[in-house]
Image (cartoon, rainbow, N blue to C red):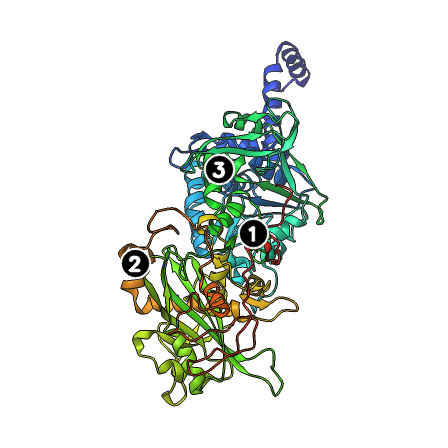
Amino acid sequence: MSLNFRDIKAEASSLLQESDFSEGLSEFKRLLAQHRSDYLAWRERKPFVQWTYDNINLTSQESSRAGPMKLSVYQREIGNNIFHNPECRQVTALKGVQIGYSKGLRAIYGYAAAELAKRVSVTFPVTDDMKRFFKDELALLHSSCAAVQALLRETKRGEVADSMSEYRYKNGSIAYYRAAHNEDDLQGFTSWLQIADEADRSGWLPRGNSAGDKVSQLRNRGTDFHDSKLIIGSTPGIRDISVIWREWETSDKRMLEVKCPHCGQAQILRWGGPKTRYGFKYTVDENKHVTDVFYQCDSPRRCRVDETLKEEMIENGVYKATDIAKVPGNIGVHIPSWLSMSPGAAWTLLAQQWVAAQDDPAKLKEFVTFKMAEPWDDIGQGIDETTASSLFRQYPAEVPDDVVLLTAGGDTQLNKEGKGTEFSIPSREFSVVGWTRFGQMRVIGHWKFYGTPGEKSSDDEVRAFLGRKFKRRDGREMSILAAAMDSNGGFPEQVRAFCGSFPSNRNIWAIIGNNQAVKDDKTRYVWPRKPTPGKKGKGSYYRIESILAKSEVFRLLQYTGDHAPMFPASMPPNYLEKLLCEEKRRDAKTGKISWKEKRGRRPEEEWVCLAYAYAALKGLQMVKLQTWGDLNLAARNLGIPDTIHDPKTGEIGYDGDDMSAHAQERRAVAGPLLADPSMPKPLIRGSTTTVQAPDRVVDPLKAQEALPPKQVKRRTVRQIKPTRWG
């Protein structure tokens, strides 16, 4: 049968005219658009803040604000600049504690890996810190965030296995976990985002054989990407070696500007002080407990801003640059603890910690670095004129009431006045120090004895001095329980033989100070566990860590108020100046600490002897641990009071004539009013006359009147530098 194509065409045309293809065409266009969207068009990505809220949930075990994560104002500032500011190449976070920084890094990591499919590297100071972050933050992200969980892969044969050093996701994102301590960890990978945390920890400091700055090495891992980013954050440490402070100084130094809820005045929240118009103001009760705290607005109205308005004021704040970045693209974000909504950063708690830190340098350092997010001027710390004057007091007796025990530190040298000439005279100088139940110093005095060590007359004078009894106001007498004498001043054998002539229970020790720089002045012991034998088994000595001893004495000098050290008002006017002859230095490359003489100065015996007296205390506590290991317990057993007070009337303090050892010696020279005939007459400081043994005669000397503290001219040493944050 033949086909009539003309009829078929006509029939088909008729059917096409009668058929409706609109529904099918619509479905085709829909499917075509969907395929174009899925495979040909860029997917519209959520902003960082919205993605975090939609994908990360905080549990009640990790946060007081359980539920979808709502980023704080500073977390938003960091994340938005990293992900949405094309001009930003680095964010430097100068931060305090209790601010939720690790949780913010968790969100940033998740967004970069899951939403952007970027390579990320996370670097901590040491491996243990990295493992902690992985377990506490990243493992939780893997298990609780659906967007990240969907990217976890099952490792197949031949593929790189996931570990705590490297993690690979289905979308091509790779994460590297590294420790800055091991410099090799900073090599062999590339990443679009580098995260460097706790940058002021020692792991970030270069070592002797280091290839260079570790932050720069980490930054080089992103050079394969034209738009790579770096986040570096840390609580600041010592200003001179602070890595985060160095990076902050090259940033635009953004501070949070808020508006007063009452008057609308724009301002930066600063801690302030009692004399500033702005800042946190508080009241305390008789027990120094903070009963009320508020922020005082920096405006003529001085509005009171209570903590109930804290969240509204801070979360509506805006970070603004306060400087022009020295390195283009470096965004600095300052985050003190009082900006945090964490219960641990409540204003009342911060004010209480500030009050407790006023008499404790260690607590003050912690508050400045951990709460104020400012670097600590460890090297520049000193004693101002007012504080210096307050350290000099009239003593009620040779030994103040609160002293538990006495030690002495001795230095041996050729007389500096005649050094290098035929008139050079050897001398030995001693500082006698009393120690309170709190381990604080009560300097009894400083004495000098001329004569060559080993000569009988000279040794007899020093022996009599070390056996001297010092009187308390209650009539009790105290002896020097331990003495550390330098044996490295030109007469090592003589000094060691002299110390060895005492019975072992007298604790008169020959020492040599180890002045080599140390990595950390709080991780070693001042006094060694055993002595070092001398040549041919003669004249053993103890090699003490003098750097540590000086650091501890310097720390004690920083205390103020009831816990401050004390010096008798009869000390020479330049005594404190001599104590400040050296300064603490930290090598920027190695991080090691040493004590060096200040420019134009020399190590003074007064300073050295004080450090040796402290070393003698540590030695005594080592050999007599049960008796003197706990000074507080020893004070209780001996009935030593906490403070200076009259044993008869119970009156706190002392406001009478100076009855210190030097004051009585001066009166004794002027006339036998308070002289003890059984004791050899000691040398008056500033004189070149030798201390006399009983069989010698000395011409009468002119009495020296002790200057009251307010008349003593002492050098002013700078305090913590004021900063833009008050």
Q: Is residue 21 visible?
A: no
Pointer 2: what residue?
634
Q: Is residue 180 above or below residue 313?
A: below
Pointer 3: what residue?
351
Q: Amino acid at mark 3?
A: Ala
The image quadrant of residue 146 is: top left
Q: Nearer the viewer, mark 1 or mark 2?
A: 2
Q: Nearer the viewer, mark 3 or mark 2?
A: 2
Question: At which x and y percent is residue 82?
Answer: 62, 41
Q: Amino acid at mark 1?
A: Trp
Disc nearer the start of the sequence (1/2): 1
Question: At which x and y percent is residue 719?
Answer: 59, 52
Which residue is more in the foreground, 463 or 488? 463
Pointer 1: what residue?
376
Q: Is residue 695 above or below residue 403?
A: below
Q: How many marks?
A: 3
Q: Secondary structure at mark 1?
A: loop
Q: Is residue 165 above or below residue 353?
A: below
Q: Amino acid at mark 2?
A: Ala
Disc nearer the start of the sequence (1/3): 3
Q: Are marks 1 and 2 in contact (CB under 8 Å)?
A: no
Q: Is residue 185 visible?
A: yes
Q: CA distance from mark 1 to mark 3?
A: 19 Å
Q: Is residue 488 above or below residue 432?
A: below
Q: CA distance from mark 3 to mark 2?
A: 34 Å
Q: Secondary structure at mark 3?
A: helix
Which residue is more in the foreground, 321 or 555? 555
Q: Are marks 1 and 3 in contact (CB under 8 Å)?
A: no
Please rate how many residues cluster around mark 1, counting C-alpha atoms within 10 Å: few if below 14, some from 14 to 19, many from 20: many
Q: Secondary structure at mark 2?
A: helix
Q: Which residue, as the protein is rendered here, is positioned at the far top?
A: 18
Question: At which x and y percent is residue 400?
Answer: 40, 57
